[in-house]
Image (cartoon, grey):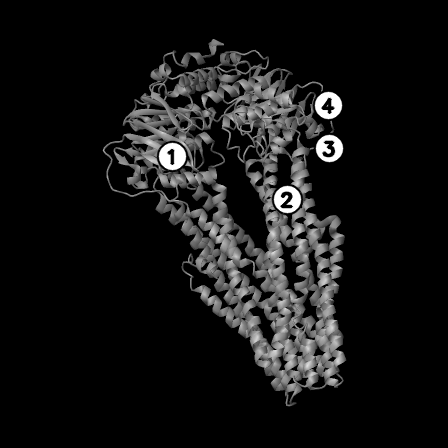
Amino acid sequence: MLNVIKRIIHLSGEYSSKIKTAFIVSIFEEIFAIMPILLILYVLIKIVSGSITVQDVWIVGIAMILSVILRAVSKRLIDGLQSAAGYEIFARERMSMGDRLKRFPMGYFSEGNIGNVTAVITSDLVFIEEHAMSVLSQVFTGYLSMAIGVIMMTVLDYRIGIISAFTVVLALFALNKLQKVVEHHSEIRQETHSKLISAVLEYIKGISVIKSFNMVGERAKKISQEFKRVRDASIEFEKRFSSNILPFENCFSLGIGLTILAVSYFALNQTLDLPLMLMMLIFIFEIYLPFKALGGLSNQIRIMEAALNRYDKISNVEIIDEDGKDVTLDHFDIEFRDVTFAYDQEDVLHNVNFKVPEHSMTALVGRSGCGKTTIANLIARFWDVQKGEVKVGGVNVKEMTSDSLLKNISMVFQNVYLFNDTILNNVTFGKPDATMEEVIETCKKARCHDFIMELEDGYDTVISESGASLSGGEKQRISIARAMLKDAPIVILDEATASVDPDNEKHIQMAINELVKDKTLVMIAHRLSTIQNADEILVIDDGRVVERGTHNELIADKGLYDDLWQRRMKARSWKINKASNGLDDVDKSINFVKSGIISGNRDLPEKN
Amino acid sequence: MSGFKNVLFYAQEYKNKIYLAFFLILLSVIAGIAPYLITYDIIINFVENSTVTPAYLLVMAVSVGFFLWLRSFLHTKGLEASHEAAYDTLMGMRIKFAKKMTKLPLGNISEKGTGSYKKNFVDDIESIELILAHLIPEGLPYVIAPIIVYIILFILDWRLALLSIASGLIGMVTVMFMIKGGLKKMDTYYGSAQKMNSTIVEYISGMEVIKIFNRTTSSYEKYVSSVENYKKYTLDWFKDSWNYMAVYGAVLPCTILFLLPVGTLFYIEGTLTLSSLVFSLLLSMSIGLPLIKLVGFLPLIPQLQYKVEQLEKTFEGEELKIIDKGIAPENYDVNFKNVTFAYDKKDVINDVSFHAKENSVTAIVGESGSGKSTLAKLLVHFWDVKEGEITIGGVNINDMSFEKLMDLISYVSQDTFLFNISIMENIRIGKPDATNEEVVAASKLAQCHDFIMDMENGYNTNAGDAGDKLSGGEKQRITIARAILKNAPILILDEATAFTDPENEDKIQEALNQLTGGKTLIIIAHRLSTIVESDNIILMDEGNLLVQGTHDELLKKSDTYKSLWGSHMESLDWNINVKGVQHA
């Protein structure tokens, strides 16, 4: 418990003084909170001694109101200091995290991880923000009121003080045990929870398969079983929790019973004054309440610690360009020298060497998973290589800041990401100070001006969340316009694999031709037919460059490239088959277009 | 409380546990008051007659300890029971919604997205637990305890009861003011929180673009301002609340604010005994904590109702209109007759009619967004049509059960979902009674036998575990094997499936070829060269059927088709060139 306090204070940084001040005010608040008890004692002493007057009533009344007012003021002060600091702290954390995120290795933002990071910064951080300060003050008041209670009892009568101290020590042990149980079981619970998530995801994602293959009954039964398992595990956890919270609470029952016995016994044998005894009988029911509340808090603290752990894990990711310098390049060739690279343990690139001269086109080709995309990512330094070096314009990319490297590179991805903003702002993303004329000229080149003008608000049209109002091909062209406006000397192009309709495809191709004019182009090619003019084609297999050369050279070599090319040609001339009888006939079903009228011959390499 | 009844309706086995919980908690509250009564007895004995013996004190002290233990014991048992009821209710909700989901139009489900349903099933339902399991066992005693205390005080001396209630009232009125004032600012607060979250999501998702375009500052500005705004509105709202919170936080626990001075006055006047005064102080002090806690629980009741209503709304969507009339289709001809379909009140498909004959190929072409995939989805009854009808062999698809419809149709889409079971079982889904040999035969036809055998456990490999290792194209081929095994007479094929894995396109095409012979084949085509030999080509444009006919007919009679064909031919010959010289 104190560990959490430490972590929160550590997190609060420069605001920790405010929190500490709030702690001091809390001490006063606690004192004002027991004022009424002391006033009871005052009244009782006066009554028992028979000297009570109406004047005492006035004194008590005014003191009582004063104590309430002072307590309210302290509470307001504490909130103003501590709760306010809480929101300041988390606003600051969000900003510094935002700042750090852009300096993480790009590879960090893999598809799975994006969801993860987003969840931590939105849900986890919000949970911590909402609970941190209240947990902090509850834990602090819990311990503080316990200490004040014990001290006060000791001052009034040391024997009762000893009983209180004994109770508290016993309770501390029980609390410790309780926390260990919670910790252990929350792991099990987390596991159950993630199993639930994957079962639910499987059910939702598979719902169309479930329905179309008539598996409703069977799958509904399966997921019901999973739900039942989650229920039983959760109930089990609660039982464990409550069976351990009972001993903790028993400590106080015991302590209160003992105190009542002692107090009244001491009063009986005249070693304790009657007013003191009466006051203690009242006070003993109050004294442990804030401390007892900590038992119920242990679950919340556990969740918060887990959230803090996840947050820390992100905070501790190393930023990539810590030692980079601002470098202005004057030429833009690319070189890989003995590059070996692994995402985790297994090397995905082995000793890759190649050079891309300025204003040339290099294509990366190979089976899916061969490492061609990795090579492109290394040029932009989305990851750092383990061995060898990647040089752009003769400078090792590790020696540059990300900004000064990426200034020179445009990338066009397969998955287009557009911001929830106007088309204009999306296009000018690469060059915020572009004039409207520039934008229009670029959009014309990127073949998107026409469809933009057809939209009701033209360039001011806001692209909705997932860009749903535009077709895939249109989004693709906007992303090309964006890259074109940036006008970087190096272009890395990942050829889109997704299919768009023919009209769109033609426009995209024209747009790309404009984009790559006079650039140093590195292209990840999936379809081969587009790269026959490449100055060099690198054929990658299993993380190695296995062949290199121009299209014609590689075809002549009759190696892997030729094989891929033949398969590609076969795929291109595919026509849907209607003659075969499915399962019965395998050979007949592979149907090629034999005549050259339609498409076949036009594809053949010798045409170029 | 009506919210409670609605929720408990979902509970299954442990429905009665909630009453048990209620009963146990009630007993625990009563047990919790006993120690005060015992203490009162000690006080009376001390103050009024002096016949106190150590034995009496021992009995009394042990009883206090016992009742305190009993209170805790009953409370934890009650908590257990309420958790059983709560988790049982969550399970019931999940089961019910999972069943409900199979009846919703699939179209609506895919529209809403997996993430949204996952949130409903896991997070939203889970959040009800907190309220459900704690509101009763913890909220209830916080209501009952003060009531019992006030009743006892009334019995003891009505003036004391009023004095005690007075300070509680001041606190409660402050709470009301706070809630009323907060409602106004709550909307701005929630608005800014939502905005901040979506900005963060966008910032992280768009990180690749942000980095590449060096626009770290400007998008960061948007991020910063949303964070700042959120902080501002939160503090704005909370600063008001703090004033109220300070007042009730100080007043509510001080239940003896009026009782002590005025009670003392009564004592001086001689209208109140010392033991009654001490006892009333004791009792009043005991409800300070419950009152404060009660304030924390108050907003949970409407929250529970709101959350359950939201969930119900999500799963309540319109169910498909299906009345199984048990008529067998005469043949496997598919007929669209004046079909109109609207999504969100906007017509997406407008009066489309065509006929796809048994053993023929019908291709649907058109730009993206023209409605070609929607036509396919209407045939598999993802949605109900708005007007017109779709028939198979003369039977309206609304008149056959979804199961029967699905026996007739295989739909091979780009969705390559595999279950977290072995590859063997994943393929067998197509025909549950298929032998292992049949599964292997289908896999061979679907071009997936080889890569399956390359895996360590072959067909027994768990598809979920292997998920990362399988390429999109490999997954696609497994789904094709499934469809081959199913061997349904009508086949809907999204040609784009072939592009899932461009490096292995030829393999997928070979696999598809195994599927298509001798069926009613409807193909959604992107690459026109694939479908030039189709018996009928349907050209869609903005939801309208523009023209239909064979390839040659359309080339002659439709300029749109001609230009599409032209674009396609050009794009096939595209070459990239950095030197700026175009090859045509």
Mark 4: which amino acid?
A: Thr
Residue A156 in sight in this render = no
Mark 4 secondary-structure assignment? loop
Residue at mark 4: A328
Task: Please check whether the numbered discs 1 and 4 fall on a single chain.
Answer: no
**Chain hosting mark 2:** A
Mark 3: which amino acid?
A: Asp
**Chain hosting mark 1:** B
Task: Looking at the image, tell me whether mark 2 or mark 4 is earlier in sequence order.
Answer: 2
Mark on residue B373? none
Which tag is nearer the camera, tag 1 or tag 3?
A: 1
Residue at mark 2: A313
* CA distance separating discs 3 and 4: 16 Å
* CA distance separating discs 2 and 4: 34 Å
Give the residue displayed 72% in from the left and 79% down from the top: A43
Mark 1 secondary-structure assignment? strand
Residue at mark 3: A323
Give the residue displayed 74% in from the left and 75% down from the top: A60
Mark 1: which amino acid?
A: Phe
Q: Residues within 10 Å of mark 3 (few under 14, many from 20)?
A: few
Q: Nearer the viewer, residue A220 or A374?
A: A220
Residue at mark 1: B341
Residue B240 quadrant: bottom right
Residue A594, x across and y down, in percent: 36, 13
Task: Looking at the image, tell me whether mark 3 or mark 4 is earlier in sequence order.
Answer: 3
Task: Please check whether the numbered discs 2 and 1 fall on a single chain.
Answer: no
